[in-house]
Image: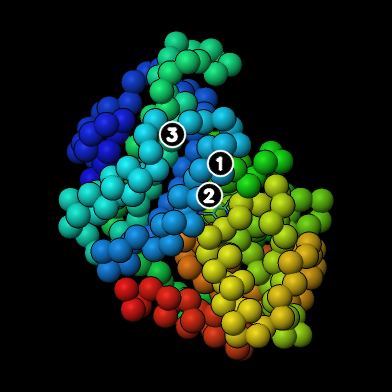
């Protein structure tokens, strides 16, 4: 495991963040998580593009050219000597005496490379609970402010579930750290890429795969009832990839999952050849 803070590589346990860092005082920053397969960062360009979008959305300016992020990540992966890892990187507004409005200071970039958790139970899938989506209305920004997400995840895991599915005014938005898909009558459904969800990189890849496989895709809002009546359902994320859902609250979904299985298989092929 390895870490990088501001301008140098550090030990992951080293205490490096100053008291007045806006990342921890305000959650004033943005982040990305990238999966490393066989020593290679997967879909890094897409993650960097979203990182830039999040930065622009809150008027954060990168302290160095974008190419340097790639270089830091590459060096981090090399230094970590890991083949299967998660790269976490973030940008905060920097270090300045505490004030709410934006201070004049350089943004601070940091990164960690850590061992990836292996994906378990993909055959069986996970159970999920539905919870009220209590987040703000700019969920497309990959903000450091994750309190509603971690509260939801905690409730789910404490009760033995694998994910919390968030519902806003009856509409399924996304998971606490994933996007949600449903399959009904051979069609694939997912929430449209509005401000109410994170535009997942895995979500976009799965949609692309569906098109290639000629699975009809419907980017449209759906209700909790629709999800519970689905033929299949799954979540997507960088760390979970494509993970089937077997139970939603008390509703058990069919065990046969032809479309999910096909998408899992095709998704794994994307990085297997790396
Ligand atoms: N989760 N929605 C939310 C709220 C998320 O936090 C994430 C990512 C996703 C999926 O996005 P992507 O496919 O780009 O990882 C959707 C973290 C990074 C994860 O579990 O890996």
The yes-or-no answer for disc 2 within 8 Å of ligand 1 is: yes
Helix, strand or loop for disc 2: helix
Q: Earlier in the sequence, mark 3 or mark 2?
A: 2
Helix, strand or loop for disc 1: helix
Q: Mark 2 sits on what residue?
A: 50
Do callouts 2 and 1 mark residues in contact (Cβ within 8 Å)?
Answer: yes
Q: Earlier in the sequence, mark 3 or mark 1?
A: 1
Do callouts 3 and 2 mark residues in contact (Cβ within 8 Å)?
Answer: no
The correct choice, above or below, for 85 with respect to 67 in the image is below
- Position in image of residue 193 (x %, y %): 69, 56
Residue in the picture at 76% in, 50% down: 168
- Position in image of residue 235 (x %, y %): 58, 66
The foreground one among 118 and 153 is 118
Q: Nearer the viewer, mark 3 or mark 1?
A: 3
Say few, some or many: other residues with alpha carbon within 10 Å of mark 3 (under 14 / 14 to 19 / 20 or more).
Answer: some
Q: Mark 1 sits on what residue?
A: 54
For this view, does 29 lie left or right of residue 42? Answer: right
Name the mark on residue 245.
Answer: none
Residue in the picture at 59% in, 73% down: 208
Separation (CA) of disc 2 from disc 1: 6 Å
Q: Mark 3 sits on what residue?
A: 62
Residue in the picture at 65% in, 69% down: 181
- Position in image of residue 161 (x %, y %): 55, 62
The correct choice, above or below, for 30 with respect to 206 in the image is above
How many callouts does the rendering have? 3
Q: Quadrant of the C terminus?
A: bottom left
For this view, does 40 lie left or right of residue 197? Answer: left
Q: Quadrant of residue 84?
A: bottom left
The foreground one among 144 and 6 is 6
Q: Is residue 98 visible?
A: yes
């Amino acid at each position: 495991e390895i870490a990088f803070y501001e301008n140098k590589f550090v030990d992951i346990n080293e205490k490096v963040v100053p008291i007045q860092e806006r990342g921890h005082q305000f959650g004033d920053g943005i982040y990305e998580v990238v999966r490393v397969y066989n020593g290679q960062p997967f879909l890094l360009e897409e993650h960097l593009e979203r990182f830039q979008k999040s930065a622009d959305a809150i008027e954060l300016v990168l302290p160095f050219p974008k190419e340097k992020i790639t270089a830091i990540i590459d060096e981090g992966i090399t230094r970590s000597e890991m083949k299967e890892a998660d790269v976490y990187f973030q940008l905060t507004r920097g270090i300045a005496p505490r004030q709410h409005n934006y201070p004049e200071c350089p943004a601070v970039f940091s990164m960690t490379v850590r061992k990836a958790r292996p994906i378990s139970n993909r055959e069986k899938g996970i159970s999920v609970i539905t919870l009220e989506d209590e987040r703000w209305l700019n969920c497309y920004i990959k903000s450091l402010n994750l309190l509603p997400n971690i509260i939801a995840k905690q409730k789910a895991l404490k009760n033995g579930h694998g994910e919390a599915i968030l519902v806003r005014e009856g509409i399924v938005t996304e998971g606490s750290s994933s996007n949600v898909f449903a399959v009904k009558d051979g069609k694939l459904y997912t929430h449209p890429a509005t401000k109410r969800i994170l535009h997942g990189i895995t979500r976009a890849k799965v949609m692309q795969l569906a098109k290639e496989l000629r699975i009809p895709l419907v980017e449209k809002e759906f209700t909790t009832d629709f999800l519970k009546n689905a033929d299949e359902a799954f979540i997507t994320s960088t760390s979970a990839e494509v993970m089937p859902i077997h139970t939603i609250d008390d509703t058990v979904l069919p065990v046969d999952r032809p479309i999910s299985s096909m998408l899992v298989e095709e998704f794994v092929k994307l990085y297997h050849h790396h």
